[in-house]
Amino acid sequence: MNQIKSSRKKWKAIEVVGLFLVILSFIVLLVSPDSLSGLFDSITKQVFPIVVDVFLLSEVGVAIIISVIVGRILERLGFTDALIRIFIPIMKFFKINPSVIIPSVYNVLGDINAAGAIAGPVLVKAKATKGEQKIAIATMIQSPQSFATLVLGLVVLTKFDIKALPLVIVAVFVPIILVPLILSKTVYRDTKAVDLEELPRFTPETKFLDTLFSSAKEGAYLLFLVIIPAVAAVFTMIGILDYFGIWAIISNAMSTCLQWLQIEPATGIVSILASPTLAMAQLVEMSNVAPALIVGGFILANSGFPLSVLFGQIPVTWKEHSDLNEKEALYAALLGAAIRLISCVIIALALTPLII
């Protein structure tokens, strides 16, 4: 008991930080009472548009719920088992569990959050190693985060007279095979080939109506209790940085980097920070843009961005539905994002002259 009392008397580093914040708060209230309200106002201006306008009032929030419903119905109709059978020969040759491609496919057909909720348990059930689960996340980042983004992207390519089919094959479908192969030979070598006989069946036997209504509830849970809190947390940090004048510097640096990466900067920032679907909608309205920047913007938008997905939604969703913790899921997502940015440069420079 005496030891507990003596240890409690000692100051811990975090308590010193807390005391500093208490003193600082009092000083700020005395010297500049409006500062705290200004900080909260800055945070609200960053969080409100993305949470309310994008996820609650636009089609994005509804699309997430519908994507979960569609994904679960496809799963109930044997879609996952069919994919496993198709990709087993290829992935067996690469000595990788074929379930690593499941998140990417559900990503294209539905939504990146639904992909994690549906494919995470599939990977666990398929006995995918932690390395293979990380490969699955990094590969998923190479795919469009919603089907609507891909469709709007095709409209953009058509407007600027860019051949869509070669670009879609190279930018969307080839990475599903190529990225697992590269990562399994370099970063995540903890992989193993699996025979079809070793895998369970993934098609659930629940009644169709039960699948329909339970998936709707699952989609609502994902939107309101996972995605929106994660987005709010990320944009709260942006609001704090913006209040202290740091975010403007970061934003300007991002514009410069995006142009260097052969990505149209204005819509590229929208893809990274807010919504790739919105970025494609804005790109349709533009004119006199270099074809290489259009191609780069298309590739970036058809990926796992925005940042709120990478830093918020993926770690939270995959922690709940896989063997990975938040840090492991985040690092895998960031690796996938880095691969996608590099591919923007390579494909935009190498492929653009051939498809315009």
Image: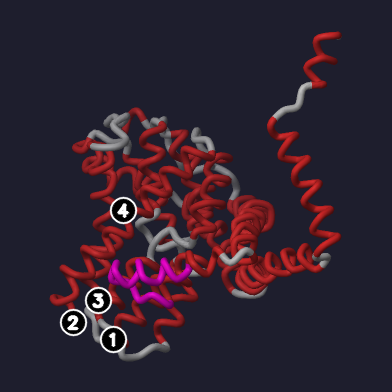
In the visual, does 354 lie left or right of 96? left
Mark 1 nearby-residue class (10 Å; few <14, some 14–19, many ≥20): some
Specify the quadrant of the image occupied by residue 244.
Answer: bottom right
Residue 292 numbered mark, or none: 3
**In front here: 182 or 32?**
32
Assess whether mark 4 and mark 1 are in contact (beta carbons under 8 angstroms): no
Q: Main secondary structure of the magenta part?
A: helix
The CA distance from mark 1 to mark 2 is 8 Å
| SS assignment at label 3 | helix
- Name which of mark 1 and mark 2 comes first in the sequence: 1
Q: Mark 2: few, some, or many residues within 10 Å (few <14, many ≥20)?
A: few
Q: Position of residue 192 (x, y in %)?
A: 29, 29
Residue bounds of the magenta highlight: 251-266
Q: Are marks 1 and 2 in contact (CB under 8 Å)?
A: yes
Per the rendering, the mark at residue 160 is: 1
Please say if 187 is above or below 87.
above
Report the amino acid beneath label 4: Ile
Residue underneath mark 2: 356
Q: Which residue is farthest left?
A: 354
Q: Is residue 195 magenta?
A: no
